[in-house]
Image: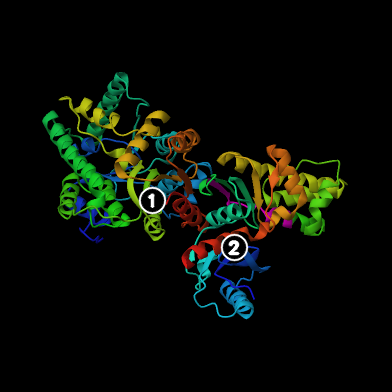
Amino acid sequence: MAKIEALGVDVGSTTVKMVAVNDHGEMVWHMLEEADPRAADQVSRFLAEAARRFGSLNGVPLVATGYGRKLVQQAARQVTEISCHAMGIYAELGHGGTLVDIGGQDSKAIRISDSGKVIDFAMNDKCAAGTGRFLENTAGRLRVPLQEMGQDALSSADEVPISSTCTVFAESEVISLIAQGIPVPAILKGLHRSLVKRVAAMISSVGLTAPLMLSGGVVKNPAIRAMLAEETGSAVTLPDHPQLMGAYGAALYALRIAE
Amino acid sequence: MQTAAVRIPGRIENILSWKEQGGGIAAVFPIHYPRELLRAFGYLPVEVWGPPVVESVSSAAHVQPYVCSIVRNGLSFLQSGGLELADILLVPHACDSLQGLGSLLLDFIHPRQPTLTLYLPRGRRESDLSFLAQELHALYRRLAEIHGDSPTEPELMSSIRREEAADASLAQLHRQRSRLPLSDLAFYQLIRSREYLPAERFSQLASEALDQAGPITERGIPLLLSGIVPEPMALLNLIPELGGWVAADDLASCGRRLYPAGTSQDPFLRMAERIIHAPPDPTRGSSIESRHQHLLSLAAESGARGVVFHDVKFCEPELFDLPDLRRQLAESGLPSLLLEVDLNDPLSHQLHTRLQAFLEMIV
């Protein structure tokens, strides 16, 4: 059985992720679930699972991140998702650049120095435009499975512009487009473009330093990756587990405590 | 109100006490105005920065939704009777929204109290000084009409010197803040009492606080706070909770009103000099470069590692400058963060995260 030295948990708005690292800072285990409103109970369950796999967690520090980080009483420290995502991606990819994390309810652009330090950041957290929730809502309205909407968008040669950046108004616009008989893939492509333009504006506010790195659950969507590269003119780089970068970074912060 | 060092009289307590002594109250909207002129006529200036958490529905009939909450709340506060104790209203022209408020009061709302306005020049040239001195003279004549009596030149000079002494104490508090046994919140409660206390009472409080100055104490990651007003004041508890402390400020309500003493023996020119020579302020037309240099200088003196721009939503004079100002600061190696607030909203979770991330970034 692998020995773990530290744990990180990312209590996000859509999912909760936990990562364990060994003494080299390598990710040796992770767990991911849809977010439960009772976040404290959910984290306890994750810890129980980690204990079942690795034995007693006594002396194994835990750092919490994500919007629900303050709810994690077991954590030795709470660190923001900005610092944790930067820490995780730098450890995984080994270089600086501009990181974009598109999460369920917010998105962020983080400029990371060659030594892994956060130089600047911007967050889109005032409305759902530019976040995963934007796609989730409209996917629901179009009755397209979330996992398939990126591929469907890319399959379309046509694209209709979505003028509303507001999620609620975009949904109304989508209904109107359906009523006009516009094919769903063209609408999907327009929706992705709308989200990507929003994120690209955020990237320009912190300044794009290549390479453009992506994290967060939404970047599993191939249309987001392709369109971001197109909008910014920069190739995009992904870690193996984009959704786990926050929790991984938190585990690395915890490893510093262990050391 | 009790801080670690001194007991600060509350706003209402102070107003009632002043009125009991036969004085009048001037309700003054932000930002720059001559306290000494109002006091020479027997009016105690009491400033109206919002106030925070006011039901602002009534003002919605008069101002656009994109007008800041300082103006919206101030108007609603007036309409709901919150300024009933005031004898006159003064609306300086700090920005288009406040200028609009002055016009609304004069042309449409017609409050019970006489409403006075004051136009401020947008520069620091000789012509600006002369213009402002004439504006202050016009304000003097208007106050004389309302009051029925007018102070003599020696009385004006005496009032000016009293305010200069209070401003010198205020500047001393700013310089000594790292030596005072006051939390960020207690420090700002003390210096913001200058918004409503008579100058002589404020000078006395400042002196009591300064008597308690000790060695410099490390309080966390030093920050420079910029913007309009430190509201909601919960921000001043949040900053230390996250490991920071306010080492200096460039707030319109605080550090940008460290008025120096004047030099002229003409009271109107002297009052004008004090306002014109105050620290840079976008509402007085200061250039971005002068603001940049001022912030760098404040950061160097205080050891601040970053600037937090804490701005009220829709504040055009502030927000227009920010992209260039923040870029210049970044090029000078001073990181910054923008937090936008509405006076009616509690501090959001998102604001909390941004501030914490900024502190993690500059530590």
Is A206 one of the magenta-colored residues? Answer: no
Nearest the camera: B182 or B135? Answer: B182
Disc assigned to residue B51? 1
Residue B336 image offset from top left, x and y in percent: 45, 43
Report the magenta residues as a range. A120-136
Amino acid residing under circle 2? Ala
Residue to which mark 2 is pinned: A247
Q: Nearer the viewer, residue A55 or A212?
A: A55
| Residue at 70% across, 57% down | A240
Q: Tell me where residue B122 sits by quadrant.
A: top left
Q: Residue furthest left?
A: B154
Residue at 28% in and 21% down: B130
Q: Indicate whether A92 appears above or below B330.
A: below
Whether B11 is drawn above or below A251: the answer is: above
Residue B346 can be seen, yes or no: yes
Crowd tier of the residue under label 1, counting other residues whose Cα lies within 10 Å: few below 14, some 14–19, many 20 or above: many
Disc 1 marks a residue whose amino acid type is Pro
What chain does mark 2 sit on? Answer: A
